[in-house]
Image (spheres, rainbow, N blue to C red):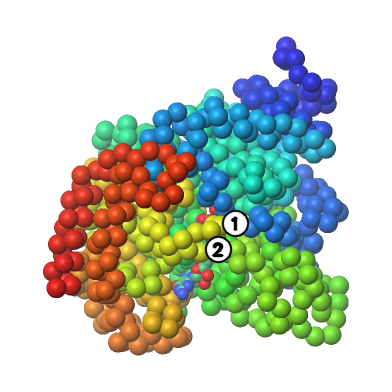
């Protein structure tokens, strides 16, 4: 017997068709949110096509010309106050604030639920509540986890269908007794009442008043990185020896790609903060002296995996099924394989996942044909007879308009369209993670590439990875961003540091870790390094160092190549040998202040942020090994700068 609710018979009969262990939760949420109807997402394309048509009929989606990007390609505009992640409103709700740590915002779970119950009360009146199943990729790997998102946003459903594995969702969820749950409503889109909340103990997240990517697409950051990240921490903590199978052990904010060297394919993971080049490096092409090397794409944002029994290496996969890429700057020069995917969608993908969904670019109408334009695409702003253009705010504009596409305008697209997808993309066992690249935007300090002398030193540098702000999150400032994961570590950062320090004990053949920085600037603010396709030359130098072919030079921040180790022939922008020599070593002035800055940062991790600590979780002691590495760094830096 179903408990007493005020739900209609139609809603009740939908709910009873769900797997038995989910019904109570969905019923309770429906009773609170009061949708007019409840619809179960089947995972089949016909239903998604119907939702796309409804979004088009309502004016939310503009259908783009099939001849440009293939079938089922759409354009949407967001609310003007809902264009990026909102870290200030991202909250971890644990009983003990120490479990959230000093970097996360923290609210007592009961208090947060009370506040959210009010905001969710009746929020779906006049709307449909969709029940969306999903599973991390690949569905049949031992690391896969299924979950359910409830949402009143058909736009979120259509994006999720391209980004996450929904079609295997129910099959996996049937077998999974405990399942993570996310309830989302775009609510009123009011930013004052926007909340992205996580209740790790309940495997439950509630997010309201945003329809944007990382705030609303549950399987991505909310579930994929944060909740599964906690699961990976707990599994890794309980693991006592390398051959013990504990399920998923590692989840990181990393792109994943392979490059063939002779008969071996080396797999790289790239942990760069949001909008710092993950999609670029995973979908770019090597050029010049490396033109014969193919880059094989596996993923552009989140990896998960574990140590393989008997092998001792970390095996990882992209846990997503699509990409959510920044369009500004997307071009044949910056990420050719992504452009190819847009130009040549595969028929089976067009019919199943669908085509790209663009949000917040410039809409271009040319005699009845609709397409989009974005900044730094290499294409002139469209002008001429029969052409009309509107900016992301919906205003008709011309080439001289200041406001064109939004800085964080994005495109959602199924990864299966990428022509150079690694054949192991959906391999249940994953691929070995050979090299981990850790980077950020550092205009003065960090060398183009460096390698720590030991594992602990690498962890220390990664914990002190610095990066300048981007448009991917609202109101960001320059900051340290541990392993490019700062906004996504849903537990105490000291435990995260310890987890990384423990890797060699649990994974006898851990990846080689290199720090990279494509973003050094000259005194006029220009980037010194060519970047993009030239970055693969830097990776080539890394592989040569690993193979013992080149001997690198000591600096306080790690070993660095000599200029002759990086081939500068046929560069597009011409970084000179002198410039290369400059960016291969840390800037002395920057290094001097870095020692004190890092000391301040580590103290903040241990004692709480100096400014803006209000509303955050509580700190705890950092592992001693981190302080030991800091002392060693300080000594090396003082000698170097003397
Ligand atoms: P999220 O999706 O937000 O997690 O970001 P991402 O890391 O995938 O970022 P993406 O690859 O979309 O980075 C985009 C930005 O980085 C664009 O502004 C690019 O122009 C810039 N970028 C990427 N690679 C390079 C590079 O090698 N040099 C320079 N100067 N800019 C780069
Ligand atoms: C990021 O900001 O790191 C992204 C986009 O990948 S979002 O899905 O919004 O998190
Ligand atoms: Mn990201």
At numbered mark 1, what does the secondary structure look like: helix, strand or loop? loop
Q: Residue 613's spot in the image, x, y percent? A: 42, 46
Relative vertical location of residue 515 with respect to residue 494 in this rendering, above or below: below
Q: Pointers 1 and 2 in contact (CB under 8 A)?
A: yes
* Point 69% across, 34% down: residue: 120
Residue 525, position in %: x, y?
Answer: 44, 80
Q: Which mark is residue 471?
A: 2
- Asked if 507 appears above or below 336 in the picture, the reply is above
* Res 17 seen here: no
Quarter of the image with the N terminus in it: top right
Q: Which residue occupies 24% across, 43% down? A: 623
Percent position of residue 23, x then y:
67, 23
Label 1: few (<14), some (14–19) or many (≥20) C-alpha neighbours in 10 Å: many
Q: Is residue 438 above or below residue 492?
A: below
Residue 106 seen in this snapshot: yes
Q: Does residue 76 appear to the left or right of 103 in the view shown? A: right
Instruction: Tell which circle, 1 or 2, labels the residue nearer the N-terminal end.
Output: 1
Q: Which residue is mark 1?
A: 84
Under circle 2, the secondary element is loop
Q: Give me the residue at 32% from left, 31% from top.
A: 238
- Around disc 2, counting alpha carbons within 10 Å, would you say few (fewer than 14), some (14 to 19), or many (20 or more)? some
* Quadrant position of residue 176: top right
Establish whether ligand 2 lies closer than 8 Å to the Cβ of label 1: yes
């Amino acid at each position: 017997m179903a408990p007493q609710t005020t739900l209609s018979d139609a809603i009740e009969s939908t709910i009873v068709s769900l797997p038995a262990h989910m019904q109570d939760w969905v019923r309770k949420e429906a009773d609170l949110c009061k949708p007019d109807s409840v619809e179960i997402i089947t995972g089949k394309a016909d239903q998604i096509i119907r939702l796309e048509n409804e979004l088009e009929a309502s004016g939310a989606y503009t259908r783009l010309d099939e001849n440009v990007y293939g079938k089922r390609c759409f354009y949407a505009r967001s609310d003007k106050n809902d264009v990026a992640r909102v870290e200030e409103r991202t909250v971890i709700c644990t009983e003990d604030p120490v479990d959230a740590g000093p970097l996360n915002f923290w609210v007592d779970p009961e208090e947060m639920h009370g506040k959210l119950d009010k905001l969710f009360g009746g929020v779906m009146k006049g709307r449909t509540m969709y029940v969306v199943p999903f599973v991390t990729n690949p569905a049949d790997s031992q690391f896969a986890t299924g979950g359910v998102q409830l949402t009143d946003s058909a736009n979120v459903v259509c994006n999720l269908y391209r980004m996450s594995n929904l079609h295997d969702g129910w099959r996996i969820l049937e077998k999974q007794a405990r399942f993570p749950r996310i309830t989302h409503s775009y609510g009123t889109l009011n930013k004052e009442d926007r909340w992205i909340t996580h209740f790790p103990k309940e495997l439950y997240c509630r997010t309201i008043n945003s329809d944007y990517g990382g705030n609303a697409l549950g399987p991505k950051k909310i579930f994929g990185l944060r909740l599964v990240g906690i699961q990976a921490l707990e599994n890794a903590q309980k693991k006592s020896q390398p051959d013990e199978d504990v399920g998923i052990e590692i989840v990181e904010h990393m792109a994943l790609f392979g490059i063939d060297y002779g008969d071996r394919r080396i797999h790289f993971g790239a942990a760069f903060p949001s909008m710092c080049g993950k999609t670029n490096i995973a979908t770019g092409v090597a050029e010049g002296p490396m033109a014969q090397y193919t880059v094989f794409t596996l993923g552009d944002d989140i990896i998960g995996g574990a140590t393989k029994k008997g092998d001792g290496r970390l095996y990882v996969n992209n846990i997503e099924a699509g990409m959510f890429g920044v369009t500004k700057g997307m071009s044949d020069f910056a990420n050719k394989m992504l452009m190819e995917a847009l130009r040549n969608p595969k028929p089976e993908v067009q019919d199943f996942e669908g085509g790209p969904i663009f949000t917040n670019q410039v809409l271009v109408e040319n005699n009845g044909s609709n397409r989009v334009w974005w900044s730094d695409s290499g294409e002139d702003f469209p002008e001429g007879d029969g052409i009309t253009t509107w900016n992301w705010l919906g205003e008709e504009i011309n080439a001289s308009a200041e406001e064109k596409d939004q800085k964080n305008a994005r495109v959602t697209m199924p990864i299966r369209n990428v022509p150079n997808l690694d054949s192991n993309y959906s391999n249940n066992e994953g691929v070995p993670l050979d090299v981990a690249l850790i980077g950020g935007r550092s205009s003065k300090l960090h060398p183009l590439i460096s390698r720590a002398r030991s594992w602990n030193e690498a962890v220390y540098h990664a914990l002190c990875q610095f990066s300048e702000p981007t448009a991917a999150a609202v109101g960001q400032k320059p900051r340290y961003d541990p392993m490019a994961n700062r906004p996504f570590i849903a537990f105490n950062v000291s435990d995260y540091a310890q987890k990384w320090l423990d890797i060699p004990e649990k994974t006898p053949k851990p990846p080689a870790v290199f720090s990279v920085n494509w973003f050094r600037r000259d005194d006029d603010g220009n980037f010194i390094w060519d970047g993009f396709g030239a970055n693969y030359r830097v990776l080539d130098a890394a592989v040569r160092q690993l193979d013992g072919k080149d001997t690198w030079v000591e600096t306080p921040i790690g070993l660095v190549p000599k200029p002759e180790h990086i081939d500068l022939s046929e560069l597009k922008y011409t970084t000179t040998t002198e410039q290369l020599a400059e960016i291969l070593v840390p800037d002395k002035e920057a290094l001097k202040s870095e020692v004190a800055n890092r000391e301040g940062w580590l103290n903040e991790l241990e004692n709480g942020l100096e400014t803006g600590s209000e509303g955050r979780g509580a700190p705890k002691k950092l592992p001693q090994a981190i302080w030991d590495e800091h002392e060693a760094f300080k000594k090396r830096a003082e000698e170097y700068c003397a």
